[in-house]
């Protein structure tokens, strides 16, 4: 089959190559990939690829071979899946615990845009706790996670202030329910009960300073790729007794398939709107990777395998 293989070359991070078709484990179904989406974090991993590892975490397509142990969807079923690797290919073996059925009302393009960003947003808000009536500051709101968090949090009754430098993306976040859009953390008017921080660098201490007393900052990314520096004594001039919590989306008490099914249901009901910034075929993958890394794509880049 055809699959994208990392090269380690920044000028051409992946090449289309012939590889062996996957042999599913007992708990894995074989999925014919119809669309996959690209996450910015995956573009970073391509800079120093792990030998033998192939990219691809967000896919949608058809189950063409059911899991040998009888679990999960049976063929032929439309599904969205979240394999840990290998999804940028014609076929991928996906654990049935990371698959959810797609109804006809949700396209494969929408499905492919859901997994990583949607799971992160859903589980991030669960980690934040009840948000009804609470003030939430969201940094790095321009990406897929930011759009999902804004829509889900606003629907749950939060007053969301979203930070984005892009006016067009800010307008879209306002449509999704953000109460206020600011272009820099320093312009955010606190105090906030919850800060959801994904930028790192200088933005993290600035966001932390806008927390209310005993507020919570959840650190779920470092898009700036710059470490943050914190001063213990700064807390006494701002959010005394604040909590800083590290977050990883795979550390959860719920199952991936259940959460994927919840995201699909919300999308089918028109309550969640995957942001698709570009749809192309896999011949244009190199350009899409560059544009995503440099933030020239608004929303998710979804590639179709035709």
Image (cartoon, rainbow, N blue to C red):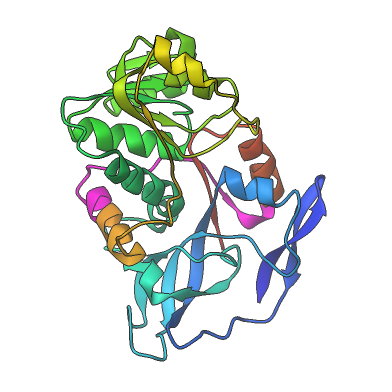
**Residue occupying the point 54% across, 73% down:** 92
* Residue 167 seen anywhere in this rendered image of the structure: no
Q: Is residue 203 left or right of residue 262?
A: right
Residue interval drawn in magenta: 265-283
**Between residues 302 and 281, which one lies in front from this camera angle?**
302
Query: Is 167 above or below relative to 49?
Result: above
Q: Position of residue 89 (x, y in %)?
A: 60, 67
Above or below: residue 35 compared with residue 172? below
Q: Measuring 44% from the left and 8% from the top, which residue is drawn there?
A: 187
Give coordinates of residue 78: x percent, y percent: 35, 69
- Determine the image quadrant of residue 181: top left
Instruction: Tell whether 264 sits left or right of 98.
Output: left
Q: Is residue 284 above or below residue 206?
A: below
The answer, for residue 259, to whether it is visible in the render is yes
Is 276 in the magenta?
yes
Q: Position of residue 200 (x, y in %)?
A: 56, 29
Along the line of sight, the residue nearer the viewer: 244 or 39: 244
Q: Residue at x 22, y 44 (%)?
A: 270
Q: How many marks?
A: 0
- Inspect the magenta stretch and tell me whether residue 260 lies in it: no
Split into 4 quadrants, where in the image is the N terminus? bottom right
């Amino acid at each position: 089959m055809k699959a994208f293989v990392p090269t380690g070359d920044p000028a051409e991070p992946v090449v289309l190559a012939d590889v062996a078709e996957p042999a599913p484990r007992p708990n894995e179904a074989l999925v014919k990939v119809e669309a996959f989406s690209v996450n910015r974090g995956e573009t970073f991993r391509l800079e120093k690829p792990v030998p033998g590892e192939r990219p691809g975490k967000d896919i949608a397509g058809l189950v063409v071979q059911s899991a040998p142990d009888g679990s999960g969807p049976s063929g032929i079923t439309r599904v969205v899946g979240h394999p840990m690797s290998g999804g940028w290919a014609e076929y991928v073996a996906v654990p049935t615990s990371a698959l959810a059925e797609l109804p006809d009302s949700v396209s494969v393009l929408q499905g492919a845009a859901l997994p990583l960003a949607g799971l992160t947003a859903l589980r991030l808000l669960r980690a934040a706790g009840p948000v009804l009536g609470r003030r939430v500051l969201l940094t790095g709101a321009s990406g897929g996670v930011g759009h999902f968090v804004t829509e889900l949090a606003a629907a749950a009754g939060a007053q969301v202030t979203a930070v984005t430098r892009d006016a067009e993306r800010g307008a879209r976040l306002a449509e999704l329910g953000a109460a206020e859009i600011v272009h820099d953390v320093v312009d955010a008017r606190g105090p906030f009960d919850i800060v959801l921080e994904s930028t790192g660098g200088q933005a993290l201490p600035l966001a932390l300073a806008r927390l209310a007393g005993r507020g919570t900052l959840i650190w779920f990314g470092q898009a700036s790729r710059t470490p943050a520096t914190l001063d213990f004594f700064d807390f006494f001039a701002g959010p005394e007794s604040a909590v800083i919590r590290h977050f990883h989306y795979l550390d959860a008490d719920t199952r991936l398939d259940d959460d994927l099914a919840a995201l699909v249901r919300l999308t089918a009901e028109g309550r969640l709107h995957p942001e698709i910034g570009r749809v192309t075929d896999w011949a244009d993958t190199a350009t899409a990777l560059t544009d995503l890394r440099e933030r020239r794509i608004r929303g998710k880049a979804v590639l179709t395998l035709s």
